[in-house]
Image: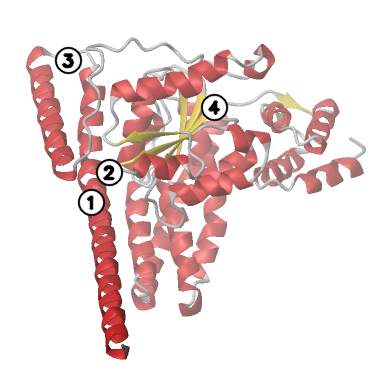
Amino acid sequence: MKAHVKEVEALRAEVEALRAEAAAQAQAQSKFLARMSHELRTPLNVIIGLTDLILEEDLPGPVKAHQESIRSAGAALLSIVNDILDIPAAEPGPAELVRADLSAAKALVVDDIQNNLDVAAGLMRKYNLQVDCVSGGQAAVDRIRGRLPLYDVLFMDHMMPEMDGIEAAHAIRALDTAYARDIPIIALTANAIAGTEKLFLDNGFQDFLAKPIDLTRLDAVLNQWVRDRMAKRPADIREDIVPAGQPPNESDVDIPGIDAKTGIVRYGGDADIFLSALRSYADNAGPLLDKLRATSPETLRNGGIHAHGLKGGSANVSAEQIRAAALELELAAKDGDFDRFARLLGPVLKETEHLVADINAWFAAYDETHEKPRRQEPDPEILGRLRQSCQAYDMRGIDEAMDDLESVSYDTGADLVAWLREKVDIMELDEVIGRLAKENL
């Protein structure tokens, strides 16, 4: 009897071992398919997406024919990849999409790969959407927390360093404001294997777009989550939506190390937004460089995070050389190689400081030839509005008051306006309220 029991127990253990091995193999296969989907479909997203954008331009006949050949070859390769990975093909859409302007709504696109940002933003701007781009999950969380501006939809990549798309979606929902709870979050991912859509829907996303982005599917998503939702809003909630600016014919931005043409295109042809990004880059680079300079072997991981921030900020203003150098710095930190990090750091610091100086010099000359109206001092009525908006946590009101204050130059009080901008940008609203109260405003 004992021998029989031992035999049964041994058989049960063998069955459990086989079951565990089968589960491990299935999990390994799933991870392999997900990785292959991501690695193969990501470059195809860029090839097909950019070709779609180019084909919408007025091209000479031979050039258009070549582009159509590239598009067909990309689609054929995508079909092969889908067959290998057992991914269902997208339903065929209409031969020509009729895109309706989305009353210039605001969209935030999040992806750590700049080419993917360019493709997604380019496709969405065909709807006259006002599109902002950030390169990481934490940046997206910060934008939603700051409520400046208010976005109508958020497109989020899945696989990103530091904070991935699912972690970012959880962090946004955890902010627990009506805005953060309700904003539609659409997953963007090259991982299109079976079960992926359910993964996103179970983790705070409303919908799912596979890369390469299918134009018909994008159209359906924008109509459902932007156009239809906006149509249901009361008019007073939509009153802050303004048409996207028309691209300028040319720009006189000439700063060594900055690809101004690419930068302006990145912001939808809006030179004013690009110049604001440049000012912000110059204003915020100093503290970031100080943090990098203070990196020690014990704080190398934080050094990598700061390098990642410099990389993203540099990409936002098309400072490609510094972006690439910051990437190498980040990789050294991720590898735990402090000696390599320290060796690379010096040139990065020097080059960035030099660029910031050049940016500030350019703006000094630019501001002289684009002089603002002058007042003796900041308008007390506007300062009072700013205080009331801070007390009510009214980000739109804060934004409008700061715009009014910064549209004028002052004989006295310019330092107050600069201080207010600094505090508003980092959301230290209690300090703003306190100082304005002391000024009896």
First reached walking from the N terminus: tag 3 or tag 2: 3
Categorize mark 3 by other alpha carbons within 10 Å: few (<14), some (14-19), many (20+).
few
Q: Secondary structure at mark 2?
A: loop
Task: Pinpoint residue 132: horizontal percent, then vertical percent.
Answer: 47, 33
- Return the residue at label 3: 59
Mark 3 or 1, which is nearer the eye?
Answer: 1
First reached walking from the N terminus: tag 4 or tag 1: 1
CA separation in Å, label 1 and label 2: 7 Å
Task: Pinpoint residue 248: horizontal percent, then vertical percent.
Answer: 41, 19
First reached walking from the N terminus: tag 4 or tag 3: 3
CA separation in Å, label 2 and label 4: 28 Å
Categorize mark 4 by other alpha carbons within 10 Å: few (<14), some (14-19), many (20+).
many
Q: Secondary structure at mark 1?
A: helix
- Residue 193's tag is 2
- Return the residue at label 1: 33
Q: How many labels, in total? A: 4
Question: How is colour applied across the structure in the image?
Answer: secondary structure
Q: Amino acid at mark 4?
A: Asp
Categorize mark 2 by other alpha carbons within 10 Å: few (<14), some (14-19), many (20+).
many
Q: Secondary structure at mark 4?
A: loop
Q: Amino acid at mark 3?
A: Leu
**Could you tell me if the residues under marks 1 and 2 are in contact, i.e. CB atoms within 8 Å?**
yes
- Return the residue at label 4: 152
- For the C terminus, the quadrant is top right
